[in-house]
Amino acid sequence: MYEYIVGKLVYSNPSYAVVECAGIGYNIQISVNTFSSIKDGETVKLFLHQILREDSEMLFGFFDEKERVLFRHLITVSGVGANTARVILSSNAPGELYSIIVNKESSRLKSVKGIGEKTAQRIVLDLADKLLKENFEVGNIGQTHNNSANEALSALTVLGFPRMAVEKALKKIIETKTTDLSVEELVKETLKIL
């Protein structure tokens, strides 16, 4: 029903953004890749996908239309819901995910939380040919900006990961890295551990 929204970004974290348009604040679920491409206070354009359920209405937003295409393909796969698709897109840059699927590297999808071997194989089997037929190239989306480990913790707990496990994983990552990591990098590294 909705194609996109253009408005002022009032608030964002790695799991959702609030975009004000015509005096209404829209809560939009986003991936880490989209989060890294937007800045609070700026006017943004997010491509939308609406999911209506008996008990809820959710908007998913994407900085790039091609990321939305990947999301829509992912949710057509049996066993992959909207939140799982968002976690997959948060764990891999769109270009990387496109490459994983068309090159049929299902083993690389298994590192994503909630994706087992059968689901990874099903994603590759169902989507490889479809993505090749569409013949589009997906580039990496945006560069990250400085954020704290608290934002990564918040994003991962909102996605449903246990707070204690996330804190432990984040601590381990921060101790082993010699350089400061962006929130996107922290989330991706933590997802590999969880």
Image (tube, rainbow, N blue to C red):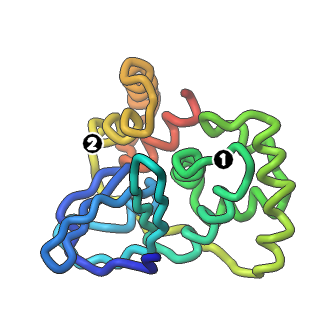
Disc 1, SS? loop
Q: Which residue, given by chain and number where applicable, does mark 1 sit on? A: 80
Say if 101 sits above or below 177 in the image.
below
Sequence-first disc among 1 and 2: 1
Residue extending farthest to the left is 23
| Residue in the image at 35% along x and 43% along y | 180
Residue situated in front as seen by the camera: 158 or 137: 158
The secondary element bearing badge 2 is classed as loop
Q: Amino acid at mark 2?
A: Ser
Residue drawn at the location 86% of the way across and 55% of the way down = 125
In this rendering, would 140 be left or right of 76? left
Give the numbered dot on residue 123. none
Give 176 or 48, whichever is nearer the viewer: 48
Residue 187, given in percent of the width and then of the height, sits at 45, 42
Mark nearer the viewer, 1 or 2: 1
Give the image location of residue 49, x and y in percent: 49, 67
Q: Please name the residue shown 21% across and 76% down the image.
A: 21
- Could you tell me how far apart the alpha carbons at marks 1 and 2 are, in whole angstroms? 30 Å
Depth order, front residue of 22/18: 22
In the picture of the structure, the residue carrying the numbered disc 2 is 148
Q: Quick check: 185 left or right of 9?
A: right
Identity, as a three-letter code, of the amino acid under mark 1: Val
Q: Relative to residue 180, is residue 190 depicted above or below?
A: above
How far across and down, in percent of the image, does residue 80 sit?
A: 66, 47
* Residue 99 sits in quarter: bottom right
